[in-house]
């Protein structure tokens, strides 16, 4: 058999490519399958974080900020550990971005605080001198869209199998239960804020957009791993 193949270069090449392809698939496909699964202990976005993510998309933050740290030293020195594909398992849509007018934000929750984000969104130059980013003062006045956030989270759970209401996941439950959890999460963020109007609004039962956005920003990075 082997002697015959050696005397027929065409068939030898075909046989070689066939064996090589099968071996390659056996070696590569399991790694692809593993990489496409959620990273260990990855948490879904809470409803407040989902509301903030919707604002991030609405305000086109991804037009100036990427969420993809590449595996180069220049990137990891500046932004932290490089991004893993499994970290995006619950992201719909992906917000990798294609431009960096501003810095990458995929690890921003690991090194920025609620107080920093509050000042930055009210007046970017107060914390980043020379910044060309516009102020987002309207977020301190507008109420977060709780109903739409719940609808997205519920859809992700039912349609895409995002593991809410599981031991390692975020509790979703009914709308009233999710709303109550959203306010508890909002209280923790507002406690670290200085804006009195935002504090008063929460006391009246209203969550401002800035609170939801900060919740989302704080979630980006290693904080999305369940303890």
Image: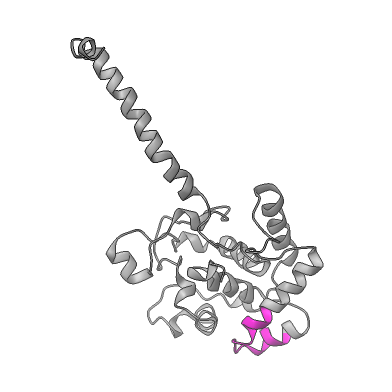
Expressed as whole percent of the image width and height from the top left, the position of residue 45 reads: 61, 64
Q: Nearer the viewer, residue 75 or 222?
A: 222
161 part of magenta stretch: no
How many marks the image carries: the answer is 0
Identify which residue is drawn at 46% across, 56% down: 96
Q: Residue furthest left?
A: 7
* Colour logic: one colour
- Vertical order, 34 against 218 (above or below): above
Expressed as whole percent of the image width and height from the top left, the position of residue 208 reads: 68, 76
Q: Nearer the viewer, residue 141 or 111?
A: 111
Identify which residue is drawn at 44% across, 64% down: 65
- Vertical order, 52 against 63 (above or below): below
In the displayed structure image, the side of residue 116 where residue 104 appears, left or right = left
Identify which residue is drawn at 52% across, 51% down: 37
Expressed as whole percent of the image width and height from the top left, the position of residue 122 reads: 54, 81
197 part of magenta stretch: yes
Image quarter in which the N terminus is found: top left
Expressed as whole percent of the image width and height from the top left, the position of residue 213 reads: 59, 71
In the displayed structure image, the side of residue 191 where residue 107 appears, left or right = left
The secondary structure that dominates the magenta segment is: helix
Q: Nearer the viewer, residue 5 or 112?
A: 5
- Vertical order, 36 against 210 (above or below): above
Magenta span of residues: 186-200
Image quarter in which the C terminus is found: bottom right
Identify which residue is drawn at 75% across, 77% down: 206
In the displayed structure image, the side of residue 215 where residue 75 appears, left or right = left
- Res. 14 image quadrant: top left
């Amino acid at each position: 058999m082997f002697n015959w193949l050696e005397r027929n270069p065409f068939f030898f090449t075909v046989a070689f490519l066939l064996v090589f392809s099968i071996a390659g698939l056996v070696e590569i496909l399991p790694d692809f399958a593993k990489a496409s699964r959620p990273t260990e202990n990855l948490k879904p976005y809470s409803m407040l974080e989902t509301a903030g993510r919707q604002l991030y998309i609405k305000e086109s933050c991804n037009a100036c900020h990427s969420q993809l740290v590449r595996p180069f030293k220049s990137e990891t020195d500046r932004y932290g550990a490089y991004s893993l594909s499994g970290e995006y398992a619950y992201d719909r849509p992906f917000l990798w971005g294609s431009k960096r007018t501003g810095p990458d934000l995929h690890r921003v929750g690991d090194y920025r605080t609620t107080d920093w984000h509050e000042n930055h969104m009210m007046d970017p130059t107060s914390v980043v001198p020379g910044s060309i980013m516009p102020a987002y003062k309207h977020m301190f006045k507008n109420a977060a869209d709780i109903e739409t956030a719940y609808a997205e989270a519920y859809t992700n759970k039912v349609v895409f199998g995002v593991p809410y209401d599981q031991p390692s996941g975020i509790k979703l439950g009914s709308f009233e239960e999710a709303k109550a959890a959203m306010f508890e999460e909002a209280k923790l963020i507002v406690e670290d804020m200085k804006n009195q109007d935002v504090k008063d609004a929460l006391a009246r039962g209203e969550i401002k957009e800035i609170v939801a956005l900060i919740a989302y920003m704080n979630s980006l990075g290693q904080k999305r791993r369940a303890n």
